[in-house]
Amino acid sequence: MPQKNTITDLAAYIWQNIKKSTKLEYRIPPSGILEELFETLYFASMNSEEGELIKVRVAFYNPNEPVGFRRTRNIERYNYIPFGKPMPYDVKSIVKLSKSADPWSSSLAVYFDDDQELQIYGLIDQAVHTESYLNRESTTKPDQAGLFQVSIIGIGSLSVIREYDLIATFKQNILVTQFLDVLRFGPISRLLKAKAKNFTDEIIKFIVSNDFDVDIEDYEPTIHNIWRDTLSRILIHIRNYRHGGAFLISAETTGLKINYTVSYDRLHKSMARLLKWTIACDVVEEEISILGDRNMKMDLFNEYLIGKSKKKSSENELKGAIRFIASHSCVDGLILFDDDLFEQGYGVFVQDLHAPKYIYQATDNTGTESLLVRKSLSHYGTRHQSMISFCYANEGSIGFVVSQDGDIRAFTKAGDKLIMWESIKTHKYLKSAPSRRLPTTRLKSL
């Protein structure tokens, strides 16, 4: 069984993390302040307001922050809106304010006064842009307010982020500080890259048909990023339903009972369209930047505006396809994709359960043999056992299971072992690498 932790452990870990920072603009708060901050949110998470669970984010924000801290002049940057007078930082105030401070709208600005008392000083606006970035619905990374942010993510569950790094989660007295990026590294990442071959070939064909003088290898990271981001977004939306759910990526259907058969290819097609229009826009933008002829620039600029509009439409189409598919998780049973990410059906059940006696939990992205932890299947419920059974019988299949409490696990077979990863990354917490400029060439057709 996992080791039980306390809020004191969480506060100590965050305090040490802040203390090690080389770019600290705030003075290090006393550890007791952090313990009170987290403990109050922890107890607030066990309440409800108007029959709904509490959702709120707190920014540890100094209301006297100097103007010089503002790094950008972006019009969408957050503002601090003070209350007429500070409110006490307690469970009652948090529960009451949570209805007016949904994490998609704002954060509570909390800091300590000269008497070492925590106060709610006001609100931080423009939170929708932070949430859009974290949920992979935007590539624009806005500034974040304060030294760090802590959110209620469920009953007795908190998460702490700082500069888009997920520092820790605390769920039902389990402190997690390591998060596995299995969609980017390791066996599951390699399987996904192999399954994306048809998608990659489609993009190659597009590049060739438009006479783009580019090397497809330069774009392989972008191709795999869109697959990873799309799968992450589906998992995020399934988790947000708080119902639990699962999806399976497999070319095999033997042993599956599909209650609701569909043939939905729009997810794949919208990803392809988005990538094509992204390439097209960047190519035209690059040519505009080097042209000296004003008239030719204007012609290309009009072409660029059309491309940007098409790209935006593709982003919206993909968003709709993701939410359409994620909603199918609310029906009992898993969602089934083929290797091209075409949805084949939902409400799917594994009929023949031939599960291994043991599974092996990976403690790193790659599933290093010496670091595997053997676990009995009896520790897991029916949804997990079904996914384990199918993936064990069908090498090359990838399964994801979202528990009702929000935990996400990934499964695949490696050699003779069924490997499980948990505490996996889905939100875009880590800082993105700068995008690469496309070589100069003009769009001929799309």
Image (tube, grey):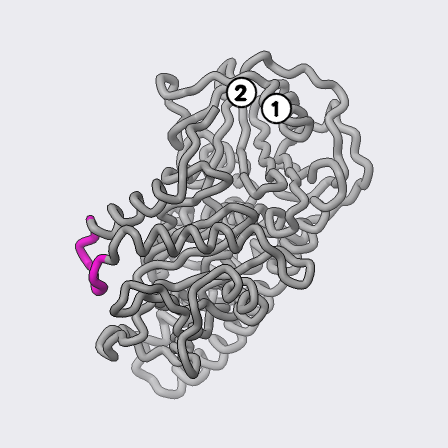
95 is within the stretch colored magenta: no
What is the quadrant of residue 382 in the picture?
top right
The one nearer the camera, 66 or 94, is 94
Relative to 12, say whether 208 is above or below: below
24 within the magenta span = yes
Q: Quadrant of residue 352?
A: top right
Residue 321 location in percent, x, y? Answer: 66, 56
The span shown in magenta is 20-28
Q: Quadrant of residue 82?
A: bottom left
Q: Amino acid at mark 2?
A: Leu
Residue at image x 38%, y 68%? Answer: 119
Q: Foreground: 61 or 145?
A: 61
User: What x and y, as percent, mark residue 355?
Assistant: 64, 16
| Image quadrant containing the C terminus | bottom right
Q: Amino acid at mark 1?
A: Ile
How far is mark 1 from mark 2, CA to CA?
Answer: 7 Å
User: Magenta region, mostly helix, strand or loop?
Assistant: loop
As drawn, 47 above or below 193: below
Residue 22: x percent and y percent?
17, 54
Secondary structure under the numbered disc 1 in the rendered image: helix
For marks 1 and 2, the one nearer the N-term is 1
Task: Name the residue tied to disc 2.
Answer: 418
Question: Residue tagged by mark 1?
Answer: 388
